[in-house]
Amino acid sequence: MGVEPLAALQLRARLYALVRAYFAERQVLEVETPILSAAGNTEPNIESFSTSFSGHVDAGARERWLRTSPEYPLKRLLAAGIGDCYELGRVFRNGEAGGRHNPEFTMLEWYRVGWDHRRLMQEAIALVEAALAMVERRAEVLVTSYRQLFLDELGIDPAHASIDELRAPLAEFGIGPEGLGHDDWLDLLITHRLQPVFPRDRITVIHDYPASQCALARIRPGEPPLAERFELYLGPYELANGYHELNDAAEQRARFERDNAVRRARGLRELPLDERLLGVLDALPDCAGVALGVERLLMCLADTDAIADVLAYPFSEA
């Protein structure tokens, strides 16, 4: 179903007001960080936009990257001692355009000092519940570990299943196996078998991922070791991704370099590392952070599957 343009803009304004009131009440500081950076996002599955600065060379690197999230500058502020903070702003991802994606969109990202991912996911749930209440809706909540979700829904232990066991439930989709590893098949099981059938009026939170899917999260030792991260879904939509944040610069550099190695193997351009982040990451306090896609939440609030319905103008009309 469509959404009237004025109603969509009013809904967005109400959500922004709710977010700002929510964090003001909790004494979380709103900040604004650069959209253009001399560093890129090395994540192999995300493509960045770049542009060139034409001013004096003393101003710094000429090539600049439009941010894919405000994560790196926010962590620099945290390392400098700013404390709990959030940013609500535009981010950019190249190549992501379609019914549910727009190359320019809004991200809400926030950090809590002294918290882990388990505590932060409860706050993320509460924020989504407050947004739903704004449109007189409620949702049940399911919190489950990554391993337990696979065991309950598919009868598969993701830590020990063979690739053949992971492929079997995906046979109907005819996915070619070329170049796909263990984690790729796990991701496909989530996107093709699990996520699409999450009930529309349920908040689903999955936590403690395989260590191989650590991204920027800490790894908790054990058998198997686990990445201290979570993802939050409302109905079938992934809304938020959170971490108990890594604050080891040497380990983070190694992860960035692994990303660039994957990019090389895929024939993609390597991206410059954020040396300013790496230079202060050891001073990052123990904290947890989460990024939430605002348009995804608006789509759920407006009960639409088309991202264009919650934008003033989609990419094709910008």
Image: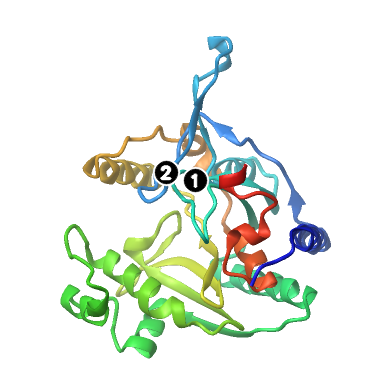
Quick check: can you spot residue 292? Answer: no
Left/right placement of residue 315 relative to residue 158 reads right
Look at label 1 and name its amino acid: Arg
Q: Nearer the viewer, residue 174 or 207?
A: 174
Report crowding for label 1: few under 14, some 14 to 19, many 20 or more residues within 10 A (C-alpha): some
The percent coordinates of residue 192 (x first, y second) are 36, 74
Q: Nearer the viewer, residue 11 or 218?
A: 11
Residue at 46% over, 83% down: 197
Q: Verify CB contact (< 8 Å) between mark 1 and mark 2.
A: yes
186 in relation to 77, above or below: below
Q: Nearer the viewer, residue 246 or 306?
A: 306
| Res. 194 mark | none
| Res. 93 mark | 1
Left/right placement of residue 5 relative to residue 233 reads right
Quick check: can you spot residue 83? Answer: yes
The percent coordinates of residue 38 (x first, y second) are 50, 29
180 in relation to 142, above or below: above
The percent coordinates of residue 201 (x first, y second) are 61, 83
Q: In the rendered image, which residue does mark 2 sit on?
A: 47
Residue at 18% over, 73% down: 163
